[in-house]
Image (cartoon, grey):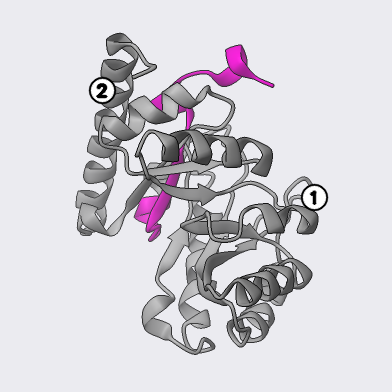
Amino acid sequence: MAYSKELFDTLRSNADSVRQKIADACKQAGRDPSEVTLVGVSKVFPVEYAEAAFEGGLKDLGENRVQELVPKIETMDSLGLHPNWHLIGTLQRNKVKYIIGKTYLIHSVNTLELALEIAKRSESAGIVTDILLQGNVSGEKSKHGFAPDELLKAVEYVSAMEGIRLRGFMTMAPIETAPGQARPVFAATRELYEKAKSCVKDPSSFNVLSMGMSGDFTEAILEGSTCVRVGTAIFGNRNAYNA
């Protein structure tokens, strides 16, 4: 055990606080909290933070960068700890080969070329990789992903690929300067998600809508999110460990 009891207690308490907020948002929306997966985003923090969070009950962990994800997976595996690993950051095509077979879900598939690379390498390895398509519904130039008018076309193309399973969509809303500003982006993404169900081969497995981070996850849940990606609210300010 590389982490302190203080760290363990802090992360578990923070995660419990987030879970309570998820439950409150679900109650307001008339939803069951079990419908929402909490992904703890341990990016930048040392691996002992991921270890402590997992041991404290956080079974889904997210990372932004392949070069940080892979060593954490290897270290955790050596300890007999096996979280569901989510890659939530931008994935370059030349890094795909390093993560095939290692992820529970890739959230950030933002081009057809990237989807094809994942499909080819997965098929060659004899596995099926679960992915989400990233939608840039807000239209911000600083964000990656398919524009709304491209997203449904991409669904038809990607869902026909062998080696991958399209599970749903991911999006990021603009940083809020006032409460509620993110909700229109989440609502528009949910509408596209519902439309896309008629375009996929297996609608029953198209069931993940990844929306919401530390600052706006409650609003995302009110608009139908099934997966929230929470870093700061659980792990704290990452500036001290920023690489």
Specify whether 201 is left or right of 91.
Answer: left
114 in relation to 141, above or below: below
User: Hey, what amino acid is under mark 1?
Assistant: Lys
Quadrant location, the N terminus: top left
38 in relation to 120, above or below: above
Residue 233 seen in render: no
Q: Secondary structure at mark 1?
A: loop
Picture residue at 59% right of the left edge, 49% below the top = 172
Q: Residue furthest front?
A: 78
Q: Position of residue 123 (x, y in %)?
A: 62, 77
Q: Nearer the viewer, residue 131 or 191?
A: 131
CB-based contact (under 8 Å), mark 1 and mark 2? no
Q: Nearer the viewer, residue 179 or 200?
A: 200
184 in relation to 52, above or below: below
99 in relation to 152, above or below: above
Q: Position of residue 218 (x, y in %)?
A: 37, 43
Picture residue at 61% right of the left edge, 88% below the top = 160
Q: Nearer the viewer, mark 1 or mark 2?
A: 2
- Is residue 229 part of the magenta span, yes or no? yes
Q: Secondary structure at mark 2?
A: helix
Q: Position of residue 136 (x, y in %)?
A: 67, 59
Picture residue at 22% right of the left edge, 59% below the top = 31
User: Hey, what amino acid is under mark 2?
Assistant: Ser
Picture residue at 59% right of the left edge, 42% below the top = 70
Find disc 1 in the rendering and name its residue. 141
Find disc 2 in the rendering and name its residue. 13
Q: Position of residue 12 (x, y in %)?
A: 27, 25
On the image, which quarter does residue 161 sit in? bottom right
Residue bounds of the magenta highlight: 220-243
Residue 164 seen in render: yes
**Residue 22 has which mark?**
none
Specify whether 65 is left or right of 50.
Answer: right
